[in-house]
Amino acid sequence: MLPIDQLHEIEGRAKMMVQEFWDANDQEQNRFVRRPQARWSPPPAGTYKANFNAAIFEELHYAGLGVVYRDHSGQVIAALSQRIGLPRTVEMVEALAASRVVEFARELRLFDVILEGYT
C-alpha cells in the first residue's frame, strides 16, 4: 500500500494531466473554422428543390450518394440513398452525385427543379 503523501502526489499529477489534456483539446478545437449554419429555403410554388450530397468511405471502398426532393411547403416528395463503387477523385464523386440527382428527377417526372448540392 502507498503512503498517503504519495497518494496525494498521484492525485495532483493526475489532475494536472487531465487539465493539460483539456487545454490542448480546447486549443485544437479553436483552430477549426466554424461554418455558418446553413438554413434550407423553400423553392417557389410549383417547383421542387433537390438537396444532394456524397460521402466517401475509403476504408470500405465505396461512396454514398444522397438526394432529397421537397416541394414549396417543405414536404419531402422523394428521397434516395445509393452506394456506388469508389471513384478515383472527390470531384468524380461530386459529379456522379449531380448526375444521379438529375436522373432521379427524370424518374420522378419532376421538371421544375432547383438543385442544391453540398461539397
Image: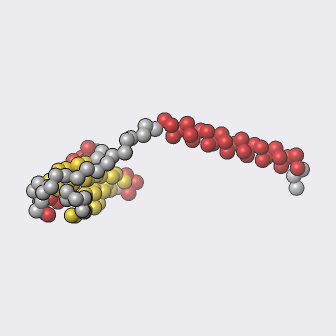
Decide if residue 18 is on the left or right side of residue 48.
Answer: right
What is the x, y in percent for residue 3?
89, 50
Total marks in image:
0
Quadrant of the frame with the N terminus:
bottom right
On the question of residue 63 being in view, the answer is yes
Q: Residue at x 10, y 62 (%)?
A: 109
What is the x, y in percent for residue 72?
19, 57
Q: Residue at x 83, y 46 (%)?
A: 8
Q: Residue at x 38, y 41 (%)?
A: 35
Question: Which one is in front, 111 or 41?
Answer: 41
What is the x, y in percent for residue 66?
28, 57
What is the x, y in percent for residue 46?
12, 57
Q: Residue at x 35, y 55 (%)?
A: 61
- What is the residue that sits farthest to the right in this orientation? 3
Decide if residue 5 is on the left or right side of residue 106.
Answer: right
In this picture the colour scheme is: secondary structure
Quadrant of the frame with the C terminus:
top left
On the question of residue 82 being in view, the answer is no
Q: Is the residue 89 above or below the residue 73 in the image?
A: above
Question: Which one is in front, 47 or 10?
Answer: 47
